Amino acid sequence: MPIQTRTTDAKGRVSLPKSFANATVLVEQVSDTEVRIRKARVVAEDDVVFAEENRKPLSDRDRDLFLKLLESPPNPNAALRRAVRSYQAGHG
């Protein structure tokens, strides 16, 4: 779409192209001089699918491995020890 110059009214309103008619829009203020307006894709609440609803159960092998790691976790490696020290230094 070519750039168009439009003037706002006293309340800061501007008319958008006809393709935006009766649409829900997202208005994002990027900076003091830039506003981004996009059409929103509205999804009916009943159509929203949560990630938990699509999760498949673990295979027997993966379940057994997970439980084994919970019972006896591996020793921390150097990278984990550094991360813990760094976290403790920042939150100590």
Image (cartoon, helix red, strand yellow):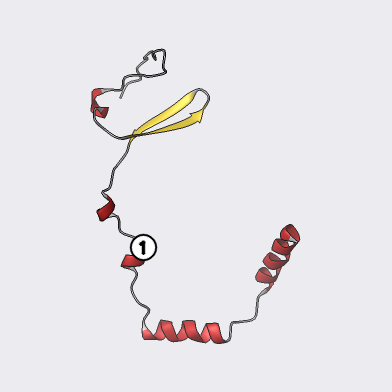
Q: How many numbered marks are there?
A: 1
- Left or right of residue 70, residue 24 in this image: left
- Left or right of residue 28, residue 50 in this image: left
Type of residue at label 1?
Ala
User: Which residue: 24% across, 23% down?
Assistant: 18
Q: Residues within 10 Å of mark 1 (few under 14, many from 20)?
A: few
Residue 24: give x, y in percent of width and height.
30, 35
Residue 37: give x, y in percent of width and height.
38, 30
Relative to 55, residue 33 above or below: above
Name the quarter where the N terminus is drawn: top left
User: Which residue: 73% across, 58% down?
Assistant: 90
Residue 63: give x, y in percent of width and height.
42, 83
Which of the pair 59/12 is nearer the observer? 12
- When asked about the image quadrant of residue 11, the answer is top left
Name the quarter where the C terminus is drawn: bottom right
User: Which residue: 31% across, 22% down?
Assistant: 16
- When asked about the image quadrant of residue 57, the answer is bottom left
In the structure shown, which secondary structural element does the residue marked by tag 1 occupy?
helix
- Left or right of residue 68, residue 81 in this image: right
Relative to 11, residue 76 above or below: below
Residue 43: give x, y in percent of width and height.
28, 47
Label 1 sits on residue: 51
